[in-house]
Amino acid sequence: MTVTTEILKKTPLHALHLELGGKMVPFAGYDMPVQYPAGILKEHLHTRAQAGLFDVSHMGQAFLSGADPSKALESLTPADIAGIPEGAQRYGLLLNDRGGIKDDFMTTRLAGESALYLVVNAAMKDSDFAYIGERLRGKAELAPAPERALLALQGPAAVDVLERHSPGIGKLSFMQAVRATVAGAPAIVSRTGYTGEDGFEISLDGKDAERVARALLGEAEVLPIGLGARDSLRLEAGLCLCGHDIDESTDPVEASLVWSIGKRRKSEGGFAGAGLVLERLAQGASRKRVGIRPDGRAPAREGTDIAVNGQVVGKITSGGFGPSLNGPLAMGTVQSEFSKVGTKLELLVRGKALAAEVVPMPFVPNRYKRPV
Amino acid sequence: MSETRFTDQHEWVRLDGSDATVGITKFAAEALGDVVFVELPEAGRKVGAGAEAAVVESVKAASEVYSPVSGEVSESNAALEAAPAKVNDDPEGEGWFFKLKGVNAADFAKLMTADAYAEFVKGL
């Protein structure tokens, strides 16, 4: 008998998750709550109705410093990093030399600071940090910040809740960030998230995390939310899960993430895989990521074949049930000729062809607090 | 007089003469979480003991439901199609999956009693 023991890492909120009755599962090397006693459906709906608190401390945080960290980082991403205004953040793709997507990440330029603040995905952080550190050697210095925790407070009530613990924070607009004090703890607060709702991400020292989390959970509007609802919320919001919807075999055009390529970068190039990506951009990709709605009630899961007239034309990359949509939903990659909204597809689930259709994303309208 | 027995795959089966009703246990329903979809067998389908007979999906994942005993499907619980949450609310009652006729009593005798299943679950 073989016993494989994986030593799981713990976030600074691990004890709190157990106290709250979190059902713990291994995720990206961490012991994380997939749900609390309320369950995924209620947690999902509560986040859209009021506010949910997520522990996303497993994600990778780092600071990139040097003479010109923006210019250095632009060698690995097609995002317009140099153009990020002070106090703002931007979504970007970290590319390999073949233009494949290694990860997606956020870059923040805090006011008055020369170093950039980065947040990358948990499953990819060691690999990302090694790649960035190696490739930018001599040009910029990457300092991972494993001592930091990251909380996400998401939902329509998030702003009112956070105002009570960080007065004035509501002045931030979507994709703006600031150093602020939250419940007495120094933090980097950004008006962002991965649920499609208005909300905030709060980066703070791990030693302050539990106290701040308890303060936020003490508010009547806030419930703790696990990874299960985080996944159904992001899927309804049409947001990619790296390693599933996008990976190193997918380029930004196939991923339908061309919007994340800066205008200047399209003309200048100068990023890993630029030749291939720009050529793909000019000629079009042979396959594309699309939103899919099955007609019936049966969910189609990741890996399900997508067919048209009995011919397989793609694969589901994320699929499940959308509690707010009250029905099944999926994302998948299909040959480009079948990527138009309204295209009828068949999903091959347990030997049956389920009728489905290409739909626009997000599945549920997002409610970001954009500047007026 | 009916008796209910259990499988190590967390199905329950209630036998009434040669008719049986099958569902998933409270333990299984709690482990799955919120059920959002069930796929049930058609009446008239013959199933063997241990054969895949239905599918239950929660927000997170899909799981197979195996028939604990062999027999012919006489009825499926159509109410679950509109209200799959019944599986969580009352797994061993209103949340039943399907009924069988012509059940093999020898299959039934091999299954765990309620006490044996309770012990089994404790050990998991």
Image (tube, coloured by chain):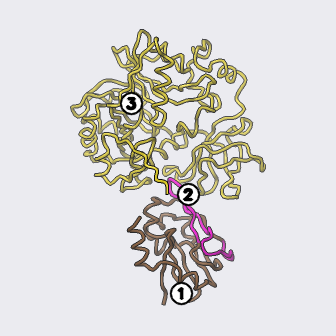
Chain colours: A yellow, B brown
Q: Is residue A165 left or right of residue A106?
A: left
Disc 3 marks which residue?
A: A191
Whole-Å distance between the Cαs marked 3 and 2? 35 Å
Q: Please state the horizontal and vertical placement of residue A120, each as a whole percent of the image.
A: 45, 30
Secondary element at tag 2: strand
Disc nearest the viewer among 3 and 2: 2
In the displayed structure, A17 sits above or below A187; it is: below
Whole-Å distance between the Cαs marked 2 and 1? 30 Å
Q: Please state the horizontal and vertical placement of residue A344, each as a whole percent of the image.
A: 71, 47
For label 3, the crowd category at 10 Å Cα-Cα, with few meaning under 14, some 14 to 19 and many 20 or more, is many
- Residue B65 counted in the magenta span: yes
Which amino acid is tagged 3? Arg
Task: State whether discs 1 and 3 lie on one chain.
Answer: no
Secondary element at tag 3: loop
- Residue B77 counted in the magenta span: no
Q: Chain of mark 3?
A: A
User: Looking at the rendered structure, which numbered label has been put on residue B16?
Assistant: 1
Q: Chain of mark 2?
A: B
Q: Quadrant of the C terminus of chain B?
A: bottom left
Q: N-terminal of the two: label 2 or label 1?
A: 1
In this rendered view, identify the residue nearer to me: A273 or A330: A273
Which amino acid is tagged 2? Ala
Disc 2 marks which residue?
A: B62
Which amino acid is tagged 1? Asp
Q: Chain of mark 1?
A: B
CB contact under 8 Å: marks 1 and 3: no
Q: Please state the horizontal and vertical placement of residue A368, each as a whole percent of the image.
A: 44, 34
